[in-house]
């Protein structure tokens, strides 16, 4: 601690270099924290997935429709408790893509029985049965648009098959919420409406996007998925069945390795900044060769000199970590409201800087500073006084 | 009793297969309280000898004993601790730390002691007063003249009350008037505080201020 004022003085003396290095580390940590927040949000989103639920889709792509006949055959299989048709509607509110929220046409009774985490009132259930236009909306989306029960709104899909002369009109029967402790990761942004309304509204052209299947025994989920696929293997529309978590993971990541990709980007950014910081530290110490020689002449031991150089680099990392975490704390919650980026990230529930990510970012920054200072510190440790003072 | 005892010291630098003998079997005694000027042409080995006495370099052969401690017996860490207690070094180019004020520069060697911050500051101010710069304690080196910077460097050298002061061309970078002031200051330290001083210099006028003069040529003591 005695040497801290000396370290701080050096950092203050060359404040432009110090500030730019701290900012470089800060931006790096901000990026790492943001990427980690996405990774965490993906994992959080998958937490709500349940292995007692399977998703059946066309073997080739989600774009291709499934026939109605499949529903009955799946429902009749032993171990299956329920089947619901689910179609991604792709509805846009007020023709403004920035006001996007996920919306699905579903077999409401079967679907809500499969998803008890979506909690609605009895009045809402009753209202759902009375009006084909009725829908339920997640609490976050309702709050976003200031909606309440009984409100009417319109959506127009960007999917050609779901378009008609007039937009679809919906009445909010209820606003669903969830117990976030019991059901972490449950999305509160969805809007669910009757599949029948879509079916009739599109003059029976809508087809079926996926089936959600509830099974009795989650431990045989993979076997059940194989059984379903085997059943339709030789049909005109073969299926691909996955557990809900596998489906979401593949859907969210599009390649299955989004988390790996994000982590790799984070590592690459960190490594680049490590090189930049190490170079800055090396330059800073090279400029002070004589000074290090003076310190050693005055009686500072090699170890103390090593500590001073490492301390300076670590302090830069520490400051960078603080800046990066502060940026992440402020910026990550703002991402959903940003143009372009906002549309992509709005679907991630729980996006934010969690304490573990903050600790990871801060620790990484300190480690980065320490690593950047290691080479110049060791060189200073080893350097002989006579060679350090030779440039005088 | 001698504060500095140099016995049959050789210093050889090797570059590839070539050997360069800088000091060739030198023996010197500097009695306690003496003021010695080491003179000689460039490359004669004056600074090398001073570095050996300061414990910042090691001889190829022979022994160097300063204030009763034989330096070759000390490890690097012990040598650093010994330097902080026993030697005050004055450089030709002052070598103050630019980011520290005059008082902080003077207090720098005291960071290695157990003194409190207030005690360190008090001692540094006393040393600055001794060199006549108490009113410049908060100035940075860039705000001082060359002569003032060298006086701060002298204050830094004496603040730990070392057994020996070593000065390497202390007036080499100064104008005549400033050089005169520095030499007077060194004389005062020798005369009134009985400091043992070894000074390397090219300047005969500076050397005349010393009580003893020794001449080196090609690594050998000639007088």
Image (cartoon, rainbow, N blue to C red):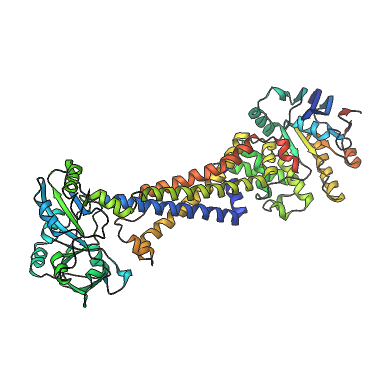
Q: Position of residue A164 (x, y in %)?
A: 21, 75
Viewport quadrant of the N terminus of chain B: top right
Which residue is nearer to you in this view: A44 or A148?
Answer: A44
Q: Nearer the viewer, residue B113 or A306?
A: A306
Q: Give the image location of residue A203, x and y in percent.
A: 15, 71
Which image quadrant is residue A3 in? Answer: top right
Q: Residue at x 44, y 57 (%)?
A: A327
Measured along the vertical axis of the image, is residue A26 above or below residue B75? Answer: below
Q: Is residue B70 left or right of residue A346?
A: right
Total numbered labels: 0
Q: Is residue B99 left or right of residue A331?
A: right
Specify the quadrant that holds the C terminus of chain B.
top right
Q: Residue B201: horizontal and vertical position, in percent?
A: 85, 39
Q: Quadrant of residue B10?
A: top right
Q: Is residue A17 left or right of residue A298?
A: left
Q: Nearer the viewer, residue A214 or A98?
A: A214
Residue at 33% across / 56% down in the picture?
Answer: A351
**Placement of A380 over or under A229, stated as above or below:** above
User: In the rendered view, would you say A180 is above or below A371?
Assistant: below
Residue A323 in view, yes or no = yes
Question: In the image, what residue occupies the spot 55% across and 53% down?
Answer: A21
Residue A134 seen in the current view:
no
**Image location (x, y in percent) of residue A20:** 56, 56
């Amino acid at each position: 601690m005695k040497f801290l004022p000396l370290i701080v003085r050096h950092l203050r003396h060359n404040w432009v270099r110090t500030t730019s290095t701290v900012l470089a580390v800060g931006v790096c940590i901000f990026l790492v924290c943001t990427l980690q927040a996405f990774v965490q949000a993906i994992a959080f989103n998958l937490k709500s997935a349940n292995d007692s639920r399977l998703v059946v889709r066309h073997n080739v792509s989600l774009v291709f429709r499934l026939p109605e006949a499949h529903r009955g055959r799946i429902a009749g299989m032993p171990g299956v408790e329920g089947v619901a048709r689910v179609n991604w509607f792709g509805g846009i509110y007020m023709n403004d893509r920035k006001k996007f929220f996920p919306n699905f046409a579903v077999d409401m009774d079967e679907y809500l029985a499969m998803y008890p985490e979506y909690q609605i009132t009895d009045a809402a259930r009753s209202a759902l049965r009375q009006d084909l236009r009725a829908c339920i909306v997640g609490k976050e989306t309702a709050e976003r648009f200031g909606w309440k029960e009984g409100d009417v709104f319109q959506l127009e899909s960007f999917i050609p098959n779901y378009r008609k002369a007039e937009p679809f009109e919906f009445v909010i029967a209820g606003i669903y919420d969830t117990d976030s402790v019991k059901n972490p990761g449950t999305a509160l942004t969805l809007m669910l409406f009757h599949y029948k309304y879509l079916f009739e509204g599109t003059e029976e052209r809508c087809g079926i996007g996926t089936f959600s299947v509830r099974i009795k025994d989650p431990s045989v989920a993979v076997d059940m998925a194989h059984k379903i696929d085997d059943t339709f293997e030789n049909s005109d529309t073969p299926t691909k069945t996955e557990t809900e978590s596998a489906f979401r993971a593949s859907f969210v990541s599009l390649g299955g390795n989004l988390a790996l990709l994000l982590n790799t980007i984070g590592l690459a950014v960190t490594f680049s900044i490590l090189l930049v910081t190490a170079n800055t530290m090396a330059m800073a110490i090279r400029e002070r060769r004589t000074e290090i020689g003076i310190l050693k002449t005055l009686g500072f031991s090699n170890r103390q000199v090593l500590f001073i150089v490492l301390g300076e680099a670590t302090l830069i990392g520490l400051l960078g970590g603080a800046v990066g975490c502060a940026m992440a704390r402020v910026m990550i919650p703002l991402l959903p409201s940003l143009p372009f980026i906002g549309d992509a990230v709005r679907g991630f529930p729980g996006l934010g800087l969690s304490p573990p990510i903050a600790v990871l970012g801060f620790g990484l920054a300190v480690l980065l500073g320490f690593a950047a200072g290691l080479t110049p510190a060791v060189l200073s440790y080893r350097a002989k006084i006579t060679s350090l003072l030779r440039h005088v | 009793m001698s504060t500095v005892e140099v016995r049959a010291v050789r210093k050889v630098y090797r570059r590839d297969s070539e050997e360069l003998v800088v000091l060739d079997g030198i023996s010197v005694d500097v009695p306690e309280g003496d003021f010695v000027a080491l003179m000689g042409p460039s490359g004669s080995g004056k600074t090398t000898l001073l570095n050996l006495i300061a414990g910042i370099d090691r001889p190829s052969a022979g022994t160097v004993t300063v204030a009763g401690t034989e330096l070759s017996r000390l490890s690097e860490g012990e040598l650093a601790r010994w330097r902080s207690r026993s030697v005050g070094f004055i450089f030709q180019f002052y070598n103050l730390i630019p980011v520290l004020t005059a008082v902080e520069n003077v207090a720098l060697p005291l960071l290695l002691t157990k003194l409190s911050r207030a005690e360190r500051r008090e001692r540094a101010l006393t040393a600055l007063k001794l060199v006549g710069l108490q009113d410049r304690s908060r100035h940075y080196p860039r705000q001082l003249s060359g002569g003032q910077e060298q006086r701060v460097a002298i204050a830094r050298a004496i603040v730990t009350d070392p057994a020996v002061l070593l000065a390497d061309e202390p007036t080499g970078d100064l104008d005549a008037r400033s050089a005169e002031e520095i030499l007077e200051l060194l004389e005062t330290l020798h005369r009134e505080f009985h400091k043992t001083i070894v000074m390397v210099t090219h300047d005969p006028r500076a050397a005349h201020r010393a009580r003893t003069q020794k001449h080196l040529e090609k690594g050998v003591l000639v007088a």
